[in-house]
Image: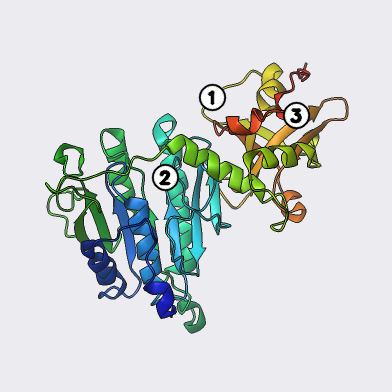
């Protein structure tokens, strides 16, 4: 149970309307002992804020709550480009503060939208949900294990039209949540259809549909959408992730200080012969592999015979490639013990923030052109 001071101190810049508070309370203290809540709605309607608020309310009743993040462009607890299942055990009173957490399970999708490969996107999400179901939602556990059953909050992207709508329908049909929270805005044409829109006629799914309005409205009750600088937010998450390469007590308070620290940071050496390299969403000629890999962010993955998809253990910056010695130089906050299991590098379209490459007076090692081809 959380302390009263934690639950009664709202974030200074976050407005939680009474309608949202009542919806979260109904989910947390309703008839479903282990609620599975699917949060959806158009872009900038407040899905992430409601999901974070719901997490806090659920943590007042449960010791831990699982969070399935399906928004690769605006991730909550990981850098962008990842699909993840994270177990949360602490209330966060200030919802304005982004916080990185180590996920329980994670896949590197390598892009900020599912548009390039909806099939792979759904496959990763279904795999994460299956893992949650097996580990935290199965009823045929021992008495001790049954106590570890966790509620689940599923946050979704704001792409709710066309293929984005079809993806949401596929997700809902696969997961069969206990609650579906639909956040609507005053521009009704941008909203999802009313009711249980994902069900076929005659289907009697037991999901409770909760329809709420976006938090901020003007005097005419029109939705006031919070316009976020998505690109900046993604850059900040990437920088916060690689800030973890250094001790927390090390003074790094500016982008310039982070850029200098990364430039001076000793990289790991990874033998090229010990790993495979896979380019996601595009094809790269073998002779251009190292050209394309140098100065990029890659997913560090571990393949397994028992798992269909390689699990991602973190991200790395390929700082340089020594083809004579056959090694890659990689900067990453992933611990060495974990890094030793990595046998696959996944390259997508997650980029190093430009602000790290253009610090005045700092020669970036990531902009080197002296890369040898593989032939």
- Image x and y of residue 321, in percent: 78, 28
Q: Can residue 112 be seen in this view?
A: no
- Considering the numbered disc 1 on the image, is that residue within a helix, a strand or a loop? loop
For this rendering, which residue is in front, 329 or 231?
231
How far apart marks 3 and 1 lie (CA) works out to: 26 Å
- Between disc 2 and disc 1, whose residue precedes? 2
How far apart marks 3 and 2 lie (CA) works out to: 31 Å
**Label 1: how many residues lie within 10 Å, few (<14), some (14-19) or many (20+)?**
few
How far apart marks 2 and 1 lie (CA) works out to: 21 Å
Q: Mark 2 points at which residue?
A: 71
Please give left or right for residue 250 compared with residue 171 in the image: right
**Quadrant location, the C terminus:** top right
- Image x and y of residue 356, in percent: 64, 34
Question: Does residue 122 lie above or below 276 as drawn?
Answer: below
- Image x and y of residue 34, in percent: 35, 72
Q: Mark 3 points at which residue?
A: 365
The image quarter containing residue 60 is bottom left
**Label 2: how many residues lie within 10 Å, few (<14), some (14-19) or many (20+)?**
many
**Quadrant location, the N terminus:** bottom left
Residue sitting at x 37%, y 65%: 10
- Considering the numbered disc 3 on the image, is that residue within a helix, a strand or a loop? helix
Please give left or right for residue 139 compared with residue 45 in the image: right
The image quarter containing residue 121 is top left
Please give left or right for residue 289 compared with residue 44 in the image: right
Q: Name the residue under label 1.
A: 282
Q: Which mark is residue 255?
A: none
Residue sitting at x 43%, y 38%: 230
Residue sitting at x 70%, y 45%: 332
The figure's colour scheme reads rainbow
- Image x and y of residue 48, in percent: 37, 52
């Amino acid at each position: 149970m959380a302390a009263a001071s934690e639950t009664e101190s709202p974030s200074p810049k976050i407005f939680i309307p009474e309608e949202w508070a009542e919806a979260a309370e109904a989910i947390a203290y309703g008839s479903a002992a282990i609620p599975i809540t699917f949060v959806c709605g158009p872009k900038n309607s407040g899905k992430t804020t409601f999901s974070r608020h719901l997490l806090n309310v659920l943590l007042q009743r449960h010791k831990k709550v699982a969070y399935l993040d399906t928004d690769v462009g605006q991730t909550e607890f990981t850098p962008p480009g990842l699909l993840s299942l994270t177990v949360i055990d602490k209330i966060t009173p200030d919802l304005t503060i982004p916080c990185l957490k180590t996920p329980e399970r994670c896949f590197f999708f390598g892009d900020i939208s599912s548009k390039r490969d909806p099939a792979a996107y759904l496959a990763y999400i279904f795999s994460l949900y299956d893992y949650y179901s097996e580990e935290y939602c199965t009823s045929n556990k021992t008495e001790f294990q049954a106590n570890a059953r966790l509620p689940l909050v599923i946050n979704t992207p704001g792409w709710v039209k066309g293929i984005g709508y079809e993806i949401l329908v596929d997700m809902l049909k696969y997961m069969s949540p206990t609650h579906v929270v639909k956040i609507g805005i005053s521009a009704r044409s941008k909203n999802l259809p009313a009711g249980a829109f994902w069900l076929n006629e005659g289907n009697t799914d037991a999901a409770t549909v909760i329809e709420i309005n976006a938090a901020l409205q003007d005097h005419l009750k029109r939705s006031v959408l919070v316009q976020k600088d998505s690109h900046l937010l993604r850059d900040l998450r990437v920088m916060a992730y690689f800030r973890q390469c250094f001790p927390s007590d090390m003074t790094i308070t500016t982008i310039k200080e982070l850029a200098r620290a990364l430039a001076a940071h000793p990289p790991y050496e990874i033998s090229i012969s010990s790993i495979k390299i896979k380019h996601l969403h595009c094809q790269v000629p073998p002779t251009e592999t190292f050209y394309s890999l140098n100065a990029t962010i890659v997913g560090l993955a571990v393949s397994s015979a028992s798992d269909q998809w390689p699990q991602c253990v973190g991200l790395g910056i390929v700082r340089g490639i020594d083809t004579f010695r056959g090694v890659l130089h990689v900067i990453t906050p992933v611990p060495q013990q974990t890094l030793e299991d990595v046998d696959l590098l996944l390259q997508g379209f997650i980029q190093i923030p430009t602000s790290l490459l253009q610090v005045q007076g700092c020669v970036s090692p990531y902009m080197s052109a002296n890369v040898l081809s593989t032939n």
